[in-house]
Each structure stands twice: as C-alpha cells, then as structure tokens.
Amino acid sequence: MDSIIISLTGSKPLYMQIYEHIRNSIIKGEYAKNEPLPSIRGLAKALSVSKITVEKAYDQLCSEGYIEGRERSRFYVAELSEPAWISPEIQIKHKKAAESGDDRTEYLYDFSSGEMDLEGFDFALWKKYMSRALSSTERLMKYGETRGEKELRAEIAKYLNRSRGVSVEPSQIIVGANTQVLIGQLCTLLDAEKDTIAFENPGFSNGRRVFTDHGFTVLPISTQDGGVNVEELKKSGAKAVYVSPSHQFPTGQIMPAPKRLSLLKWAAENGSYIIEDDYDSEFRYYGNPIPAMKGMDRQDYVIYVGSFSKIIPPSIRISYMILPEKLLKVYKSREAYYSQTASATEQLTLALFLADGQLDRQIRRLRNIYSEKRRQFNKTLGTVFGDKGEIYDTGSGLFVIFDARTDKTRLEIKEAAAERHIRVRFVGDYYMEKDRRENDKRLLLYFSSIKTADMHKALTLLKEAIES
C-alpha cells in the first residue's frame, strides 16, 4: 500500500484515486485474501490526506465487496471468486469494438432472412394512420388491454374470416409482440411436468427453444408426404404438436387435406392440441391461398398462431394467437399476471389500417412484388448454377430450396459464404438431430430482401463459396 501515488493537481478526487489503486491491486491478485489494509489514520498520514478522504475510499471498496470490515475498525482484503482484472488496454479494445460493431459480421446479402423488400411498404401512408391513432391521447396514457386493443382484435377476427376461412370471436384472440412471446404465454397454460410437445422435424427451431426453456419435453416427429408423420405422432403420447401446414417450415411443403383431417382426429381422440403456425400463408402465387387448418377445426383443438411480420415491416411488432375455449378459461384465470407486449399505438394504427382495407391492398401489392422476384430469382439461380443443383419451389412463401451438388460440408459452405459477406442456412440446420443430417445440403434461400438488380451478383458469390 506504500506504493500508492496520488495527484494533488489532477481532476479526479483524491478518494477515487486511492479507491482505484487499491481495487486494481486486489483484482490483479497483488494482495492476498485476508491481508490487512493500513489503518485509516496510518494511510491518511502516509499520503498526507485527511482521514475523511481515506474513509470514503474504504467505504466505496467495502460497499463493492473488495474489502470487509472486522474488529477494531480494521479492513481486510475480501476473497474474489475468480480473477476479475481486465487491463485498460483490453477495456479500450472492447469499447472500440462495441462502438464500431466489429464484433458482428456485416452481410451484403442475407439469404437466411425473410425480411421485407425495401419497396414493399408505404411508410408515408402508415404515418397518416398513426397520426389518427395518436389522437387518442387519454387512452394512450394507459397500459392498454392485456389481450390486445379491442379494435385490433375485432379487425383480426374479420380478416381471418375472409382470408383464412377461420371463424373466431375477438375474445379468443391474444395479441403479442411476436410469435415467441405468445408461445411463452402458451407455455404457462400447459403443464411442463406432464405435457410433451411434438415438433415437425425439421421445424421451427425458435419455437422449440421456447418450450425447452420452459421445461417441456420436446419430441421430434419426422415429416413425410407434406407434413408431420401422424402414425409416429400417435405413438408419441404428446399433449400438443407444433405444425405449419399451409407452408411447412423449412421444407415449404403443403399439408394435404386428408393428413389435416387425420391430425384433427388424433387431437380429438387424445384430447391433445394442434399448434398451427400460419406464418406466411398470404404468399401463394397461383391458385387460391391454402385455407388454415383452424377453419376445419370443429371440436376446438387447434391453437392458431399468426403474425403480420411478413406483411408489414417486422419492426412493427404485432402477432396474435387464438386459444380454444378450454385454454381461454385458464388464460382468463391468470390474465392479471400477463402484460401486453405490443405497442398500443401501433395496435390502434394497424386496426385503422385493417378497417380501411389497406392491409388487403398491402398483401396484393406484396404478392405482385414477390411473384415477380420469385420468377426472376429462380431464373437467375438456374442461369448461375446450371446443372450443378436442383431448385425446389412450391409456388408459395418467400424462399426456395436449392439442392447444391457439392462435396463440401454445410459448415465449410457457411464459412466460405461468410468470407464473401453472405449468410446462408440449410434445411438440415432445423433438424433436432443435426449430427445425423450432415448430408442434407439443401439451401434455404430467401429472395424477399435481395434486390432484383443484385440477384446475379449475390448468387455468383454463393456459387463461388460452394465451389471454392
């Protein structure tokens, strides 16, 4: 402690200089556990400062747990559970990295993201509706309704009836910021100790993760013939199964009507639930949209989950869930425990947007944009790769599957793509038993956020990554 050097002319207070010197010496391990510190009077005399200055330094060290007081007002070095020293040079390096974003890879082209086309939304129009919503100042000073604003739930009910063939009461609809938030609420309505949740394999990995984090046993069920293997599901003893029948993720397949009916029969016979994720059903490029399974549900066993994140920018965080009456009763008994996670302002804005028919116009607009982008993307993909891969396109959604002919592993392709500032994902990434699916090199290629003018360049870089 005799080596403490303080500056009488510096801008930093004297007690802080003493505090920092002792703290840094302790966390660097220069002082042993239980080593006594000089008395307040002795250190004050040695440094030619007042006793109050030393007391303030010791008080700060004590409150942060670096030292501890014992008998006769003496202080001793406390025990640190592990080395905590980070040199000033490392601190500066970390700070610069955080400020510059150096710890994140910047991608020129992201084939793994279903983000919206830059020309796909009219923010000026949205701003007009938001201005109308903001006029409800007294209402917006409150927390809002737990299930979601009543105007929005009423408009969602109308929208689902006309677009998805789903007849539902607004009281059954729960609004949330995103699908994962709603799944988290659903987890509280089921019993993690008793209930097993089945998932399509491959399937929605983020949904699986939420159930796992809540303590549920998650069981993979293989997919075949356009959807989950019902016979395998029957033997599983699952309380619920998570499916995306109108556009299976990530394979893009559509579940045929006979399999849907078989799945509904399984739910009714076992008292189990079907969690239907209808995540991008609006984008079908020929024929009519595939009706939702919820519309076929006559015995109320389908939990329907939908989102607006593919229709309006995902930064406007609004999703929704329809609960069967039995689960709705459980929800009502616990409603006071929940909080609404979606902005009331944006909920009211979206309600006005829906009521004026703007969402239907937005869907038609995006369908036209994506239909042309899909056509151009497939054409460019074929031109760039030729016979070195095969395209699988179901005519719906915002991605296509491309089976590249290569000896490279998925990891090698990802790393080579990242070097070219490209991000890619594979169908095989969404299996629960990833180690058994290394031979599945089908690429999941989203085209929605790739500019048409950039498609050839982006796909050429992808080809280089695969062949390098």
Image (tube, rainbow, N blue to C red):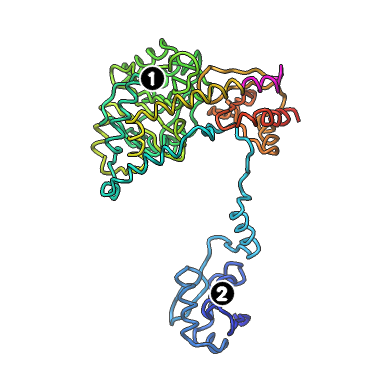
Q: Which residues are magenta?
A: 377-388
- Reply above or below: 420 against 157: below
Give the residue number, with chain letter if any, for mark 2. Answer: 22
Q: Residue at x 36, y 26 (%)?
A: 304
Q: Secondary structure at mark 2?
A: helix
Q: Quadrant of the N terminus?
A: bottom right
Q: Based on the displayed image, in which of its 4 quarters is residue 214 positioned?
A: top left
Q: Residue at x 26, y 34 (%)?
A: 330
- The image's mark for residue 43 is none
Crowd class of label 2 (few under 14; some 14 to 19; many from 20; radius 10 Å): many
Give the residue number, with chain letter if any, for mark 1. Answer: 292
Q: Residue furthest top?
A: 258
The amino acid sitting under disc 1 is Ala
Residue 342 visible in the shown view: no
- The answer to which of 122 and 108 lies nearer the viewer is 122
- The answer to which of 217 and 208 lies nearer the viewer is 208
The amino acid sitting under disc 2 is Ile
Question: Answer yes or no: do the residues labelled 1 and 2 have beta carbons within 8 Å?
Answer: no
Residue 116 lies, in percent from the top left, at 51, 33
